[in-house]
Image (spheres, rainbow, N blue to C red):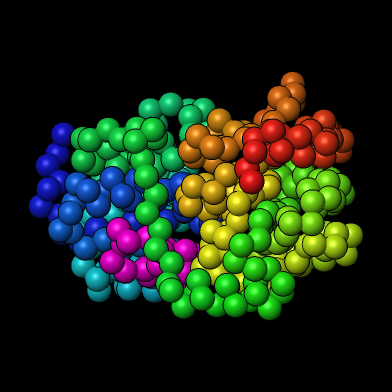
C-alpha cells in the first residue's frame, strides 16, 4: 500500500444529501485520527454548509453553488487548484464529482470505480461489497481505510457534533415563545422526504400517531422539515392540538438544535433521522422503498419499522405499483405501541 502519511492538505468531496453527509462523518473522523496534523477541507453544497460546520474534524468548507455545467466545473477546479490540496477523497460515486477534482490537478484522487470515471482517479477502488448490501457509512469508511490501511468498524464509531451556543439559545427562545418549556417532553416528527412519496409514510398516519401520543398532555410535538414541504407540517398541526409546525422555518443548524431537544424522533428514512441518531436521540424510523440494511440510523437505541415485500426494497421515488403497500402495512397503532413499549419518556 502506498504511504500517504506525508499529505498535509486533504480534500473531501462530500455527499450531496444531509443524511449521506452525516453518515460520512465517521469516515472523516477516522481520517482525522490518521492525519492528525493535516488540513482537511470539505467541498459541499451550500445547503450543507452549516451541517459541516458542526463537524470539528474539518478545517474549511468550500461551497460550489455557482459551479454547475461544464464552465462551472472549470471555475470550481480553479478554486480547488488555488488551495493546493494534495490528496482528495471523493465520497459520491458520480462522474461529475470526480471531474472537477481531476481538473484541479490534485495529485492523489481516491474514490470508487463507477460511472466510467476510473481514468479521473489516481486510485480507483473496487467496492468491498455490492453497493447497498452493507451500510452506507461502511462504504465511506472503506474509502478511508484504503488510504490509511486502518479498518474502522461501525460499532466503534462515535459522533462528535458541535453546535454554536447562539443557535441553541435561539431555538430555546423560539420553543419558549411557542409554549414549549425546558422540562416538557418533546417528540419530533419528521414527515418529509424530498426524495419522493415512496420515502414518505402517509401524513394521515403521522396524524393518527400524533393524536395517540398527545393523549397525555405532557407530550409536545414539533414537526420538522425543509423548505418546500411546509404543507406537510401544516396538515399535521391543523389536526393535533399540542403540535407546532417548524417545517421550512429553520436552517439546518437550527433544526439540529431543535432535534437535540427531543426525547424521541419519529421519522421517515431522511437526513433528520440521521441527525437525531448522531446526537444519540432515540429514533423510530419508518422505511418504505429504501433499505434499512443500507441507511438504518446508527446506534443501538433505535426502532426500525420495515415490511419486507417481494418487490422491495425498490429504491424508487414513486411506487411503481401505485399501492405503497410497504407503507400501508405499517399502522399508526403499531408505531404508537412500539414507542410506548420502548419507554422513551
First to last magenta residue range: 47-65
For residue 43, which quarter of the picture? Answer: bottom left
Residue 40 visible, this orientation? yes
Residue at point 37% right, 45% down? 158
Q: Is residue 51 magenta?
A: yes
Q: Is residue 294 magenta?
A: no
Residue sitting nearer the eye, 60 or 170: 170
> Residue 228: horizontal and vertical position, in percent?
73, 68
Q: Is residue 205 above or below residue 99?
A: above
Residue at point 71% right, 74% down? 178
Q: Is residue 42 left or right of residue 291?
A: left
Q: Is residue 225 above or below residue 275?
A: below
Q: Is residue 323 above or below residue 183?
A: above
> Residue 335: horizontal and vertical position, in percent?
75, 37
> Residue 46: horizontal and vertical position, in percent?
49, 70
Q: Is residue 202 left or right of residue 97?
A: right
Amino acid at each position: 500500500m502506498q504511504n500517504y502519511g506525508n499529505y498535509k492538505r486533504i480534500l473531501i468531496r462530500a455527499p450531496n444529501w444531509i443524511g449521506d453527509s452525516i453518515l460520512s462523518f465517521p469516515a472523516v473522523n477516522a481520517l482525522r485520527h490518521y492525519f492528525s496534523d493535516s488540513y482537511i477541507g470539505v467541498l459541499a453544497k451550500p445547503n450543507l454548509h452549516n451541517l459541516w460546520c458542526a463537524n470539528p474534524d474539518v478545517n474549511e468548507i468550500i461551497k460550489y453553488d455557482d459551479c454547475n455545467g461544464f464552465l462551472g466545473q472549470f471555475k470550481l477546479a480553479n478554486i480547488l487548484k488555488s488551495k493546493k490540496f494534495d490528496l482528495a477523497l471523493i465520497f459520491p460515486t458520480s462522474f461529475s464529482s470526480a471531474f472537477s477534482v481531476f481538473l484541479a490537478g490534485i495529485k492523489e484522487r481516491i474514490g470508487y470505480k463507477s460511472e466510467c470515471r476510473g481514468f479521473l482517479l489516481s486510485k480507483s477502488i473496487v467496492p468491498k461489497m455490492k453497493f447497498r448490501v452493507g451500510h452506507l457509512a461502511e462504504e465511506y469508511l472503506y474509502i478511508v481505510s484504503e488510504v490509511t490501511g486502518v479498518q474502522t468498524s461501525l460499532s466503534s464509531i462515535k459522533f462528535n457534533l458541535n453546535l454554536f451556543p447562539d443557535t441553541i439559545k435561539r431555538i430555546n427562545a423560539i420553543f419558549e415563545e411557542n409554549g414549549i418549556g425546558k422540562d416538557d417532553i418533546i417528540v419530533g416528527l419528521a414527515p418529509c422526504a424530498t426524495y419522493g412519496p415512496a420515502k414518505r409514510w402517509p401524513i394521515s398516519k403521522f396524524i393518527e400517531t400524533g393524536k395517540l401520543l398527545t393523549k397525555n398532555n405532557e407530550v409536545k410535538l414539533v414537526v420538522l422539515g425543509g423548505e418546500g414541504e411546509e404543507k406537510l407540517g401544516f396538515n399535521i398541526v391543523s389536526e393535533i392540538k399540542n403540535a407546532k409546525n417548524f417545517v421550512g422555518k429553520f436552517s439546518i443548524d437550527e433544526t439540529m438544535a431543535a432535534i437535540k431537544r427531543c426525547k424521541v424522533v419519529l421519522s421517515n428514512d431522511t437526513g433528520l433521522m440521521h441527525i437525531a441518531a448522531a446526537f444519540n436521540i432515540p429514533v423510530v424510523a419508518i422505511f418504505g422503498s429504501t433499505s434499512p440494511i443500507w441507511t438504518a440510523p446508527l446506534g443501538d437505541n433505535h426502532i426500525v419499522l420495515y415490511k419486507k415485500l417481494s418487490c422491495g426494497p425498490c429504491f424508487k421515488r414513486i411506487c411503481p405499483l401505485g399501492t405503497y403497500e410497504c407503507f400501508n402495512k405499517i399502522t399508526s397503532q403499531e408505531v404508537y405501541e412500539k414507542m410506548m413499549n420502548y419507554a422513551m419518556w
